[in-house]
């Protein structure tokens, strides 16, 4: 049954009830007439709004879009990919250990040490005891640049050991 057909049926039912009330209470004809007009107009308005709603295409608003669940991506953070690339390169050559991996580890170690009130540059003895020998060899301020830049880098186990020492420092 179409929306207009249902509206006509509803208007006929309202009119029938209005006629029943006029016959039952003849002194209130004016009030019943006003109520009937309001009811018929409400039915007409409902039909018009339904037709308008059906004809306008539905587009989500910015408000609705803000609350819609976002799509989950499998993309990895760019910073993680960058560190992984630097670790991979550091296994290859001593140059990459000194100029790529060392600054990252030094920044991490410096931040962890500063949380304990130790400056890597100003208190190297205290910093060395806190970070451990594997990390200290990589982050110490007086570490010289490699003479042979193409020399083999660090084994992956050494890098893992340094990362474990930094994690230990972070959680202790």
Image (cartoon, rainbow, N blue to C red):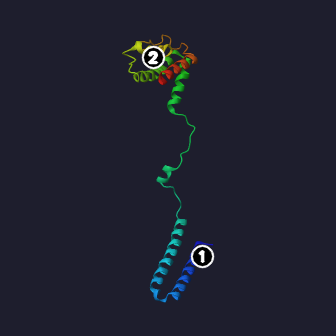
> Mark 1 and 2 residues: CB-CB less than 8 Å, in contact?
no
Q: Residue at x 45, y 83 (%)?
A: 31
Q: Residue at x 54, y 68 (%)?
A: 50
Nearest the viewer among 22 and 13 is 22
Q: Residue at x 55, y 20 (%)?
A: 160
Residue 10 place in picture, x, y as percent? 57, 77
Q: Please, is residue 79 above or below residue 32 in the view?
A: above
Residue 69 place in picture, x, y as percent? 54, 47
Residue 141 can be seen in this image: no
Q: Residues within 10 Å of mark 2 (few under 14, many from 20)?
A: many
Instruction: Place residue 140 in its image quadrant.
Output: top left
Residue identifier under label 1: 5
Nearest-to-viewer mark from 1 and 2 = 2
Residue 104 place in picture, x, y as percent? 47, 23
Compute the Cα span from label 1 to label 2. 83 Å
Residue 84 can be seen in this image: yes
Q: Please, is residue 31 above or below residue 2 in the view?
A: below
Nearest the viewer among 99 and 170 is 170
Residue identifier under label 2: 130
What element does badge 1 sit on?
A: helix
């Amino acid at each position: 049954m179409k929306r207009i057909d249902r509206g006509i049926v509803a208007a006929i039912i309202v009119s029938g009830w209005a006629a029943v009330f006029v016959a039952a209470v003849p002194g209130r004809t004016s009030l019943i007439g006003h109520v009937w007009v309001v009811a018929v107009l409400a039915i007409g308005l409902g039909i018009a709004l339904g037709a308008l709603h059906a004809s306008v295409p539905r587009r989500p608003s910015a408000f609705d879009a803000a609350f819609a669940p976002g799509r989950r991506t499998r993309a990895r953070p760019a910073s993680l990919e960058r560190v992984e690339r630097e670790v991979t390169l550091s296994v290859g050559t001593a140059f990459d250990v000194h100029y790529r991996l060392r600054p990252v580890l030094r920044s991490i170690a410096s931040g962890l040490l500063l949380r304990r009130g130790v400056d890597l540059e100003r208190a190297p003895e205290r910093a060395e005891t806190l970070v451990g020998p594997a990390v200290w060899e990589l982050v110490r301020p007086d570490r010289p640049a490699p003479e042979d830049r193409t020399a083999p880098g660090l084994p992956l186990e050494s890098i893992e050991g340094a990362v474990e020492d930094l994690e230990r420092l972070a959680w202790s």
